[in-house]
Amino acid sequence: MDFLCKLGALALLLCGGLRLGLTTKTPLPVMALSPGGSWIGFDKSMELAVHDINQQEDILADYELQLYINHTNPNEPAKPSSGNADYIIYSNFYDGPDRPMPFLLGSFYSEECAVLCRAVARFNVIQISYGAVSPSLSDRTECPTFYRTVQSATQQNVPRLRLLLKYNWDRVAIIRYSNVVFTSVMESLRDLLRVNNISIVANEMFEDTPSNHIAYLKERDARIIIGLFWDEQGRQVFCEAYKQGLYGARYVWILRGIGYFAPDWAIRPDPAISCTPEEMTLATEGVVITNWHFLPATQDTALTGRTPSNFLATYNEYAGEFSFGDAGSTAYDAVLTAAVVFNKSIERLQLVNKTLEDFTYDDEEMLQVFMEVIDDLYFVGVSGPVSFLTDGDRVGQFKIEQIRGGTAGTVGYFLSHEDRFEWIDEGIYFLNGEPPHDEIRRGDRLVTISTSGFVAICSLCGLGIALACGLLVFNVVMRKQRIIKLSSPNINNLIIMGSLMTYISVILNGLDRDKVGAENMDHVCRAQLWMLALGFTLSFGSMFSKTWRVHSIFMNKKLEKKAVKDYQLVTMVGVFITLESLYLGVWEIRPLVAVLNAYEAQATVEKDLMLIPVVQRCTRHGVTDISWLAGIYIFNGVQLVFGLFLAYETRNVTIPALNDSKNIGMSVYNVFILSCVGAIFSLLMDPLKTETIFLVTSLCVLVSTTTTLLIIFTPKTPRWLQSDDHAERDPAVFVRARAVHCQDNFLAACAKGKQHGYSLPQSSESPLIVLVTALFCEEYIFTDTARSRLLTLYKLEKLSAVTFASFLPLSLGIF
């Protein structure tokens, strides 16, 4: 209580402008302005500072600081009064204390300071405000001697920018109340955002109701919104935001420091809005506020010996109900700043033979000394480290607040000196556990083949490859067996090799960048094309050549010499392969590359992420697909059509053991139909149905390839198992056995014989009919000489069993 009594007495003495302390000290007067009335809490803070300074032996040891406080608007302290402030200042300059005062502490309001800063500069007085935050006061042209112990409103833009960069938000909206301070802050923020490549999707200003402006923010899909307004307008904004749905986990509101002294400003009763406190609590939940930080979290000791907590306790007790809490620290440090400048200027003034009491309102030299000192100033006050930028703005700290349950609480700090955040616990929390996105993000969703579908097709391909390898081994090992030898095993091997390449191409067609990596997809595209094209040509070209041989022999109505050897068929297939390889090789000038085609019309939105389906395809840069595919389609199409024609022409020829004509024809039909089905389906199907296209086209290839192998090679196995060496060594038995196998062509053989003028016996067991059946059913195995002699003997009716048997070795040419 004794301490309080002393402070009370001190306050009375200071307010009356009387000296306090030892009479040996030189008085050092300082002007001060405050709103007055119920806002005299600022007066109390400055009085406390004067008391503490005058108690220090290392600050103005030979001087006694005296404070002359004047009130600008005591009846309505919540409103600025620029006229009264201007009048008071000029009264002090002309009719004030006998000694000029080189410092003006105040005023609290930016509007008043904007008028005063010009006037005090003309009298070479330094002004230090403890509450004015307008960015316009940083203009050295207009306010050359203005400083402040509270940070400029534009300085809050720095932590705002750091928050945007921290969470990778590069798309923001701004909404502000019509006020010169907020306009200045917006302009500074706009410049900062542009420099950092952050786009402003909306920049709204309102005077009365913000409803239309909130609607525009919603129309622009603004997610990160910066609000510049007082608490009264803030309640209107968030009530409207609640009505229009601009709140919740998808949105982040970042506000300037509003509601200096009321953390629950958002839920306070307000007849100007129609929202309930509960609705306002929902609307403001998670709102982030970059606010002034008047008392640091650290307990560093100020020059006066006070720590932040000690100051706050003493100030609250001294000011009582008029206390502004931690905001009173800026007024305290404004007085301390003036005292430190005085103290540090003493030695400099001695160099020019001057003292502090020599100051006059026209002494520019002393003003220059004071400003040089204050520009280089750094000390610890109760509000933290005190230093100033070249424009007079204080370099200070900001606190990051967040509203939870309707009340703002501190979650961290921004240390301007170190340009970093210092968070409390986990810092800012987000309603859904992670920072929201500043817009609906665009992402690609690669349309791929499911693992199960790919594995299923690969399994079928594996079985097909195993089948082909088994048939290839069988064909090679048994190539000298008559049943295998007579069906041209070399050509059959080419069919198998083409089938293997086709199976491999199906597997390659199912690969994508998720399976093999984007860097390997170009190689996969080229390998798949070459495998499929050459595999088809090799397999179908071999079948085509065998069909052509059957056609050339059986459509030989004149029975002229027609010997088609295997090497000729291999040569034909080689020509096909060479032509296709040359065509594909020429196009390698513009090689196939894997590209992604996006289909935005089919995009889906999931949790602010627009997933655009992209389909992987192989193409050539600068060339349309049809221009290079046309050659492949035409070349293979001609093979298919001509092969289909040959198969139709030889549809009645059945030679199971020697030329596979019937089976080859069936294979040609099978390949033609399934190739058309697969090609048409892939062209007409929706490209996004990637898996369906893959499954259908793969099955078409697999079915056509596998059935071809089965149709061609399966019938040989049982016949090979049924054959015996004795029958093959006896020429007569051999010919009869071949004739029996050709009984399906018996009538056709008889008809051909009659066309050549031969009268045939009726019994199919007659040696003559056996010969004719063998001759006309399998005539390609007879040499030209043998055929001629057999026909001659037959015409002369001199053919006997002995003669017939004697000519068999020559005619067959295989014994």
Image: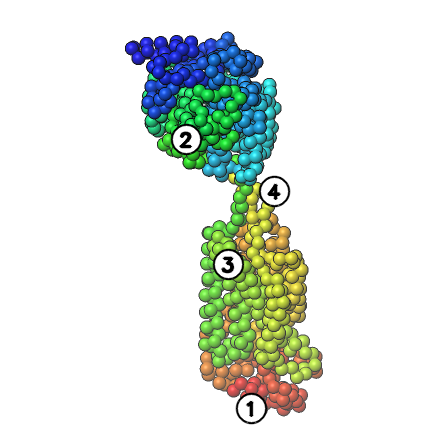
Q: Which residue is depicted at the point 39% across and 12% down? A: 19
Up-down relation of residue 537 to residue 205 (above or below) = below
Tell me the residue that label 4 is attached to.
601
Residue 598 percent location from the top left of the image? 58, 47
Q: Earlier in the sequence, mark 3 or mark 2?
A: 2
The answer to whether the residues at label 1 and label 3 have Cβ atoms under 8 Å apart is: no
Secondary structure beneath dot 1 equals helix
Q: Nearer the viewer, residue 684 or 185?
A: 185
Residue named by callout 1: 806
Instruction: Using the rendered view, name the quadrant where residue 381 is placed.
Output: top left
SS at badge 4:
helix
Q: What is the spatial separation of the Cα atoms under label 4 and label 1, in whole angstroms?
A: 81 Å
Looking at numbered disc 3 in the image, what kind of residue is underneath it? Answer: Asn
Quadrant where the N terminus sits is top left
> Which quadrant would residue 766 be assigned to in this image?
bottom right
Q: Which residue is mark 2?
A: 378
- Indicate which disc residue 520 carries: 3
Between circles 2 and 1, the one closer to the viewer is: 2
**If you read the primary sequence from the N terminus, does the residue marked by circle 2 or circle 1 appear first?**
2
Q: Amino acid at mark 2?
A: Tyr
